[in-house]
Image (cartoon, rainbow, N blue to C red):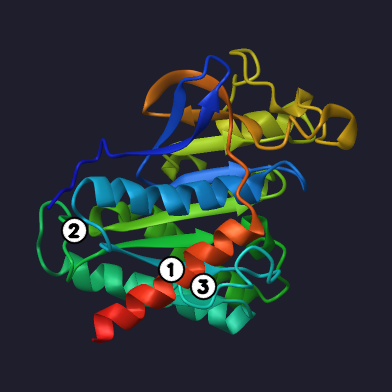
Amino acid sequence: MSNRVSSLVPLGLTDTRTVFYAVFSHLLVVGQTGSGKGSVIWAFIMGVERMLARQNEAGWVRFYGVDPKRAELSGIRYGFERIGFDADDQLDVLNELVAVMRQRQRLGLRSFVASADLPWLVLVVDEFNSFESSADAKWKREVKAALSALLSQGRSAGIVVLAAAQQGQREAIGPYRDHFVTRIALRVGSRVETDVILGAGAVEHGALPHEIPPASVSNDYRTAGVGYGLSLAQPGFVRFRAPFVSDEDIRLWDESHKRKGSENEK
């Protein structure tokens, strides 16, 4: 069994062809449409499973999702325990994980140690900014309370949050940003967004995701998946490119979990 906080998840290659790693903890990724955000999400999901397999902990993770636009996770049938699409379901998923967190906290463990019976739980939240724009004040308040609890206390109970958004909105991301151990800015619209995502002074220290050109036929889509990352795994802001993860890659990953489920039932 392992609880190595230093466990690393490879997310892509830097300009010098070294690996950019995320620490296996809360991760934030922000990028405009076509920037490669989905590939970063799936690189992390698949990378977590490979990392655990290398540590002889294969299968010691369960995935949960919140996907307000029914986009990134809409085709998943087997690989996630539960995905919330509608508002009520989104809140139910968050509250379910908060309840699990409280239950694990009552075990009195000084630090979380995963096992087959006590696996890691990874929550993937797409369109993270959408919570802030809800007109339902009560729902919004409850969602924000659950997210705050999971981000501030979840990691020590074996719960990791991956949050993704299209824009670096200060009011949506700012209150939670410091909880994300790894932060990634793909192509964004302004230097203000860069600082919101990566932290004040990021631009002055060389992080320039707002200058990344859109991926297109004219540049052979070479800028898709390119971004700047801040991670405890390496110093400073690192420019890297995440690998392209196709719909077929995701389908095969999902189907593999159907087979695993069938094998576990035997």
| Occupied quadrant, residue 112 | bottom left
Secondary structure at numbered mark 1:
helix
Locate the C terminus and report the quarter of the image it occupies: bottom left
Separation of residues labelled 1 and 3 (CA atoms): 35 Å
Between discs 3 and 2, the one toward the N terminus: 2
Between discs 1 and 3, the one toward the N terminus: 3
Between discs 2 and 1, the one toward the N terminus: 2
What's under tag 1, amino acid-wise? Ser
Residue 8: where, in percent of width, then height?
Answer: 33, 37
Residue 30: where, in percent of width, then height?
Answer: 64, 43
| Occupied quadrant, residue 222 | top right
Residue 6: where, in percent of width, then height?
Answer: 26, 35
Q: Assess whether mark 2 and mark 3 are in contact (beta carbons under 8 angstroms).
A: no
Q: Which numbered tag is attached to residue 114?
A: 2
Circle 3 packing at 10 Å, graded few (<14), some (14-19), many (20+), is some
What's under tag 2, amino acid-wise? Ala
Residue that badge 1 annotates:
256
Q: Is residue 145 visible?
A: no
Residue shown at 10% from the left, 58% from the top: 109
Q: Which numbered tag is attached to residue 142?
A: 3
What's under tag 3, amino acid-wise? Glu
